[in-house]
Image (cartoon, helix red, strand yellow):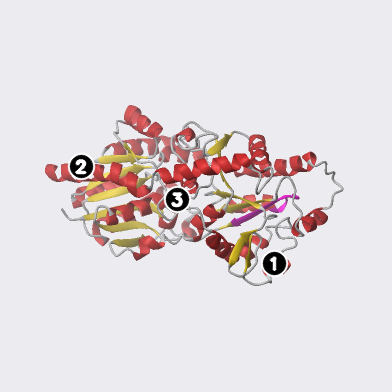
Amino acid sequence: MRNRAAVVVLGDLGRSPRMQYHALSLARQANLQVDIVAYGGSEPHAAILENHSIHIHQMKQWPRILQRLPFTLLLKPLYQFFMLLWFLCVKIPAPDVFIVQNPPSVPTLVAVQWASWMRRSAIIVDWHNFGYTLLGLSLGRGSRFVAIYHWFEKRYGRMANGALCVTKAMQHELDQNWGIKATVLYDQPPEFFHPASLQEKYKLFCRLNKDITRPCGICDCVSSGTVATSNSGLNDNLFTTQDGSDIFLRLNRPAIVVSSTSWTADEDFGMLLEAAVMYDRRVAAILNEDDSVEEEMLWKEIHDGKQYLYPRLLFIITGKGPEREKYEDQIRRLHLKRVAFRTMWLSTEDYPLLLGSADLGVCLHTSSSGLDLPMKVVDMFGCGLPVCAVSYSCIQELVKVEKNGLLFSSPSELADELLMLFKGFPDECTALKLLREGALETGSSSRWATEWEEHTKPLLSEVISRHYNQI
C-alpha cells in the first residue's frame, strides 16, 4: 500500500465540485495523501487549499492561439493525452488508485488506463454523464466522431477496476448496455452549504451591493432609486438594513431567484428569459396596469416602501461559459417593469451564502443523456432553497414535486409557478414556505461525508485490495 490516491480532472478544478469533495473525503475519511491533476482557472474551495494532505498539480491547457488551427479536433486530444501521461506517470508519486472524472472521456480514460499499467495502480471511474452524448450536442448523434468517441468511452470505461455514477438510471444503463457494474453515489451538499443567517445575508449583500445595483443594460427596477443606498455606507442595502446591532430584512425587497449555469447547449437559458417576460406582463395584467403606467413612477413607489401583491424579481445568474455573452446581449434588450437580471461569478465562499440567502432556485439543466442529475440543485437543497427545474427523464430522483420543488416543461409553466409561489411575498407566500421546509428536510437528511463513507469507501477498499491481490 502506498497510501496515496490521484484525482484526475481534465477540466477546471474550481468548477468540478464533486471531484473536490472526493479529494477532501480521500484525505479526511480514508487518511490518504491525495494528488489532484487538473487545469487551473477558478479557485478551488478553501478547504482544499488548506488541507496539507492534498497536493494540486496544474496542467497547461491547449494554447488559445492554436484553437483555430485545422485538425484541432485531432491535435488537441493528442496534446492533452501526452500532458496527462507526463503528469500521471512522472510528476506525481505512484498512487494506489486513480479516481477519474468522466466526461471528458477522450483522451482522459485512455491516458489514465495507460498510466495505471505503468504505475501498477487501480482505476475508479466516476461517471457524471456520457461524453459521447455531450459531443453529440454540437456535432450531431450521427457524426462519425461521436461514434468513435462512444467506442473509446465504452471500451476504456469497461477496463476500470470500479465505477461510481450519479443516478440509478445511469447505473441501470451502465449495467445493461455497457457491461459496467457501478455504485450509485448521489451528489450531496458538503457542510458549507447551509441556510444563511441574517448576519451572513447582511454582510453578503453589502459585499455584492455594487454588482447588484449596477444594471446589465438600461435602468431597471433594482438599479433605479438605489444611488442613495449604494452611497450610504455599509449599514444599508437593497435587502437588509441595520439598526444598531439589529439586522432586518426589508419588506419591499426584491425576491431573489438564483440560477447557476455553465452557459452551454444542454441548458436552454432562453426559457428563463421568456418566463421572466411572461411574469412581468401577467403581473401587470392581474393588477390592471396599462402600458401608460410609467416605469419610473412604479419604481419610485416601490423604493418609497409601497408593496404590491407580486414582488420585483431579481434573477442572479452565476457561472461561466461560452453562451454567456449572447444571453447578456438579449437581457440588455429587455424592457421589464418588475424583473431585473444580474450575471456574476462568485467565490467558492460567497456562492453557498448566495444560495442560502435566495428565495428560489431555477435549474435549466436538461442532460445530454437524460441520465445525470444537476449538482447545482443538490447545493440549493443543502441551503434550504426550493427549486423549479426543467422536467426530464430522471430528475424526479432528486426533485420531489410539491415537496422540495416544482418541475416545468415550458416558459409559460415556469411563469405560472413564479406567480403562484411569489404571490403575497414576503410574508403571505404559503406555497413557497412549504417548499422551503421540504428543501431544508432534503438538504439535511444526508450529507456528502455520510454518503461517501457508506458507498465510496467500501468500493475504494475493495478495488485497492483486489488490485494488489492480482499483481
Q: Is residue 341 magenta?
A: yes
- In front of the other: 248 or 190: 248
Q: Residue at horizontal 32%, vertical 54%?
A: 23
Marks 1 and 3 sit apart, C-alpha to C-alpha, by 51 Å
On whether residue 335 falls in the magenta region, the answer is yes
Q: Secondary structure at mark 1?
A: helix
The answer to whether mark 2 and mark 3 are in CB contact below 8 A is: no
- Residue type at mark 2: give it: Glu
Mark 1 vs mark 3, foreground winner is 1
Q: Amino acid at mark 3?
A: Thr
Would residue 356 be seen by someone viewing this image from the given angle? Answer: yes
Question: What's the magenta region?
Answer: 332-343
Give the residue pinned by disc 2: 462
Q: For this rendering, which residue is in front, 166 or 128?
A: 166
**Circle 2 — which element?**
helix
Residue position for label 3: 72
Q: Are marks 1 and 3 in contact (CB under 8 Å)?
A: no
Give how far across and how far down residue 435 sits, in percent: 55, 40
Q: Position of residue 386 (x, y in %)?
A: 54, 43
332 vs 337, nearest the viewer = 337
For residue 433, side relative to residue 40 (left or right): right
Residue 229's disc is: 1
Q: CA distance from mark 2 to mark 3?
A: 40 Å
